[in-house]
Amino acid sequence: METEAGLEATAALFKVLGSPSRLLLLRLLATEPATVGALAVRSGMSQPLVSQHLKTLRQAGIITVSRTGREAAYQLADHHIAHVVDDAIAHVLEDTTPKEEAS
């Protein structure tokens, strides 16, 4: 059976996005670039845990890092991913109760 183009890569993307912690980091990075320390403070996660999640996001090409001296700032590689996350959150927050049909 032939797989539709892009399905494998999309499944891999959703696998990376399957962590609430990584989604939170992406939401934080959607507003502005940030260092590991700033992300740890804003997310409430430990610095090692933030670093681990950032590594996963970098390997997936979702975020990039720019260095100035010893300081590393992380940012979204493409803001399309922020829209995907926002749309998914909006979807799960929608009222999914079936509406009564008009008589």
Image: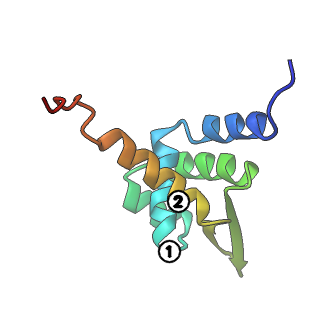
Residue bearing mark 1: 32
Residue 86 left/right relative to 82: left
User: Relative to 78, does residue 4 appear above or below in the rendering?
Assistant: above
Mark 2 closeness class: few <14, some 14–19, many ≥20 residues within 10 Å: some
Pick whichever, 2 or 67, lies toward us.
2
Q: Residue 75's spot in the image, x, y percent?
A: 61, 68
Amino acid type, residue under disc 1 in the picture: Glu
User: Mark 1: which secondary structure?
Assistant: loop
Amino acid type, residue under disc 2 in the picture: Ala
Which of the two labelled residues, at mark 1 and mark 2, occupies the earlier sequence position? 1
Marks 1/2 in contact by CB < 8 Å: the verdict is no
Residue drawn at x 40%, y 55% is 43
> Dividing the picture into quarters, in which one does residue 35 lie?
bottom right
> Dividing the picture into quarters, in which one does residue 77 lie?
bottom right
Quarter of the image for the N terminus: give it: top right
User: Relative to 80, does residue 10 appear above or below in the rendering?
Assistant: above
Q: Determine which of the numbered discs, if any, sits on residue 56 in the image.
A: none
Residue drawn at x 49%, y 48% is 23
Q: Residue 22's spot in the image, x, y percent?
A: 52, 47
The answer to whether residue 46 is visible is no
User: Mark 2: which secondary structure?
Assistant: helix
Mark 1 closeness class: few <14, some 14–19, many ≥20 residues within 10 Å: few
User: Relative to 49, does residue 32 appear above or below in the rendering?
Assistant: below
Residue drawn at x 87%, y 24% is 2
Q: Residue 100's spot in the image, x, y percent?
A: 16, 29
**Structural distance between the alpha carbons of marks 1 and 2:** 12 Å
Single out the residue that lies furthest toward the left. 103
Residue bearing mark 2: 82
Single out the residue that lies furthest toward the right. 2
Single out the residue that lies furthest toward the top. 1
